[in-house]
Amino acid sequence: MRDQSAWRFTDDRGRLTAVDPRPSRVLAYVQAGATLWDHGIHPQGIFGSGHDGPEPDPAKTGTLALDAVDYRGAGDGLDLETLLRGGPDLVVAVSYGHGQIYGLDPDTAKHLEERVPVVVIDVGQARTLDRVAERFAELARSLGGAPAPAAAEDLRAARERLRDVAGAAPEGPRVVALSPAGPDQAHVARPRMWPELRVLAELGVTLVSPAEGTGVNWSTTGWTEAAELRPHIVLTDIRSHATPLDEIDAPAWSAVAGEALTVPWNPEPVCSPQAQARFLGLVADAVGAATAG
């Protein structure tokens, strides 16, 4: 290896990867792959987590051209041979802290790292969304990518619009983020634990927290308790393993939900300027409509 010309990147575990030539056949966790795609890096393949199924989850894939990317599967269906299909020369994974690769069995991850360089980006609650996005952007630039020319300006404009809309009402509409878990339960997000929800709070959105108790990221409640949060807007988890919100017919919730606006929410967000701008735009539309109503 020629040290001066080697591709180098230090991941969020503090591990330096140096290879020559620069990687071009990237295998990525679906969230990472969708983010890199928006920066002009087209992964060869993607893989999901234990929450995913035999087909890629459209809630997570963003603008990925799925007919051009090899989905390797998820959960128990992932083995080393499947992951190495096509001969990837770099794996981009994510972690929710402590450097543990998300979505892969630890033993599979260990053997994968013995065969191919692995870069890990920390997307956990300790990170701001801006920092996560910045790290993906740094990785993409190192691989030869770049964001769309207008992406940064679109994100700036989306932030300002949401700030203006949220500031128009002194007591803005109450926003609850949740993941429907079936007819009897809802996982209600604790907003301070989610980087993308903290951005909404910083821009003036009134996010409602569930009662303190068990559960670090979520409070698991019945639908009656969820209804007692009196949301005007519901950010609802649209990942494939979540129950569609319109299938929930619990009486107490139905009485509240009939008056509430809903916004689709992916708790594993694509961390590109384009994706962030789209999400902020949807929230701004809902806040504006709730305020006007």
Image (cartoon, grey):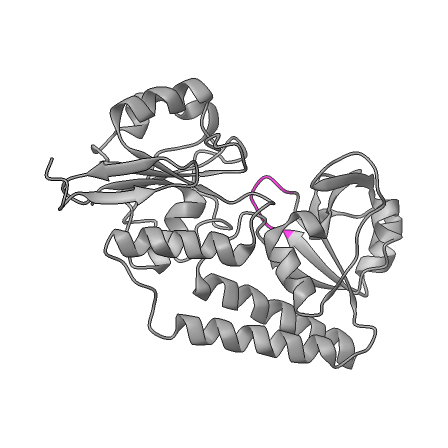
Residue 95 position, x and y percent, is: 49, 37
Q: Is 81 within the magenta? A: no
Farthest residue to the front: give it: 4
In the rendered structure, the answer to whether residue 56 lies left or right of residue 50 reads left
In the rendered structure, the answer to whether residue 132 lies left or right of residue 244 reads left
Towards the viewer: 222 or 273? 273
Residue 149 position, x and y percent, is: 33, 73
Identify the residue at image location x=81%, y=62%.
Answer: 258
The vertical placement of 231 against 30, above or below, is below
How many numbered marks does the figure carry?
Answer: 0
The vertical placement of 36 against 172, above or below, is above
Give the prevailing secondary structure in the magenta stretch. Answer: loop
Dividing the picture into quadrants, the one containing residue 260 is: bottom right
Any part of residue 70 in sight: no
Identify the residue at image location x=72%, y=39%.
Answer: 182
Dividing the picture into quadrants, the one containing residue 1 is: top left
Any part of residue 244 in sight: yes
**The C terminus lies in quadrant:** bottom right
In the rendered structure, the answer to whether residue 112 lies left or right of residue 238 reads left
The vertical placement of 281 against 179, above or below, is below
Instruction: Look at the image and give the residue range highlighted in magenta.
Output: 237-242
Residue 42 position, x and y percent, is: 28, 51
